[in-house]
Amino acid sequence: MTKTFKRYFIPHEENNYHPHVLHARRAVLYGSLGIFTKVVVAAFVLTVPLSAYMAPDVLKIQADEIFDRVNALRLEKGEPLLGKVPPLEQSSQAKADDMAKEQYFSHTGSDGKSITSLMQRYAYDYEYAGENLAMGFNTPDDVVRAWEKSPTHYANLIDEDYVDAGIGMKSGEYEDIPTTYIAMHFGAPRTTAPKDKKSDVRTGMAENKKRGAPTTRTAPRAASTAQKKDATENVAGVSVAKTQESIAFDRAGSRVYWKADGDGTLISARASIAGPVRSAEISVGPHRIGLEKGEAGIYGGSLLIPDSPDELFHTIISPSLLIVDEAGNTVQESVEWNSIKIVSPPPLKKYVFAKSVEGPTGRLFSLTEWLYRGFIVFFGIALALCIFIEYKKQLPIVIAQTLVLIGLFSFLLWV
């Protein structure tokens, strides 16, 4: 046993100062085994449907990461951190569940109701309420970055009035294509006795609680921007903004359309707006589309953007509408897509996603990582014995090939 160990690991005259474990053929065998293991794991995770990674416990971890990233953004902007409260966790999960069950993506639920009904169902007596939605297979960073690029969604993320939040995620299908639905609800509880309906509606100017100065407030934010209780009313599925008495926005009569145009995407929009409008524009991520008034209060416009449809729908969120009336008051609302493209992530992104989530695939990656760490330690010790036991008799080729082998396993550990 001692002779065998010495022959394989200890450089000495009998093995020509070349431990057998570090022979070139064995080095090739070890390296091939490491590469083969990585190829098998990669092939497995790329053939498994993405929906298999979306177990409830995995979604819960991702939801927590999104919540933490939103709070990190608020901390950066000097806004109070949001606290999780059961009613908003329940309402947001109910929204995500409903979208997955009925295969739709809209701030108006399958029953024709909005976030206000959900909050009332789960006994959250709110002063302000807001909702951000997203859809697609994305990392928490992808989701928060997409919300940051949209004015209405970003307004919810950093709104100083919100103190509570909840987030729900649900794996499902959209037009029979696997995807994930995300809903985040924001709120502030009512702290005073209920007022009459008229006085409970925002009119566009409100006291800035943090700084004590007046600021222009947006129209109801139940659909990506904050709203007071009773600030909208649903009539036959049509949500009519009432916060600005001079402006009325018909959500059901407004849509954003898209079609591929070469390497880019042609975006066109129509918005049904009544009242003295000074300007109106649609935001699709960082892109702005000015709207011109047409017949019967229909505003429209189009813009060719450089993003391909796959890039545009990488993370799906609703476009934003900004309306400025003649008095300078603003109304911000979300507008629905006429159609949506579900984008399957490229193989590399799917691989990274599978590696990052917990569950069976995460444990498989952890097992291979321990294997590579073991090889690195093993050959590191073997190389140290080879160098320091007979440091006067060195074979540079042995040292070089062992370092290459350690480098290979380090690379396989990283990817």
Image (cartoon, rainbow, N blue to C red):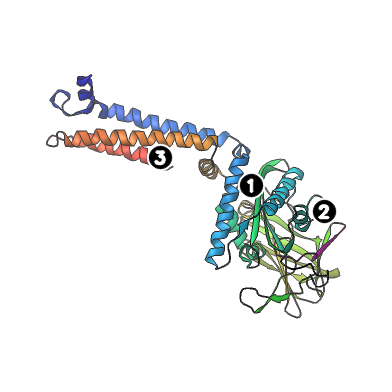
User: Would you say the residues marked 3 and 1 are in contact, meaning their CB atoms lie under 8 Å apart?
Assistant: no
Instruction: For the C terminus, give its image quadrant.
Output: top left
Q: CA distance from mark 3 to mark 1?
A: 29 Å
Q: Which residues are magenta?
A: 224-235
Q: Residue at x 46, y 37 (%)?
A: 366
Mark nearest the camera among 3 and 1 is 3
For the question of whether residue 47 can be seen, the reply is yes
The tag earlier along the polypeptide, 1 or 2, is 2
Q: Residue at x 75, y 80 (%)?
A: 327
Residue type for callout 3: Leu
Residue 382 position in % (x across, y down): 25, 33
The tag earlier along the polypeptide, 3 or 1, is 1
Residue type for callout 1: Val
Compared to 352, does 193 lie above or below?
below
Farthest top residue in view: 1
Residue 148 horizontal side relative to residue 367, left or right: right
Residue 81 position in % (x across, y down): 58, 62
Magenta stretch: includes residue 231: yes
Q: Secondary structure at mark 2?
A: loop
Query: What residue would you read off at disc 1?
Result: 343
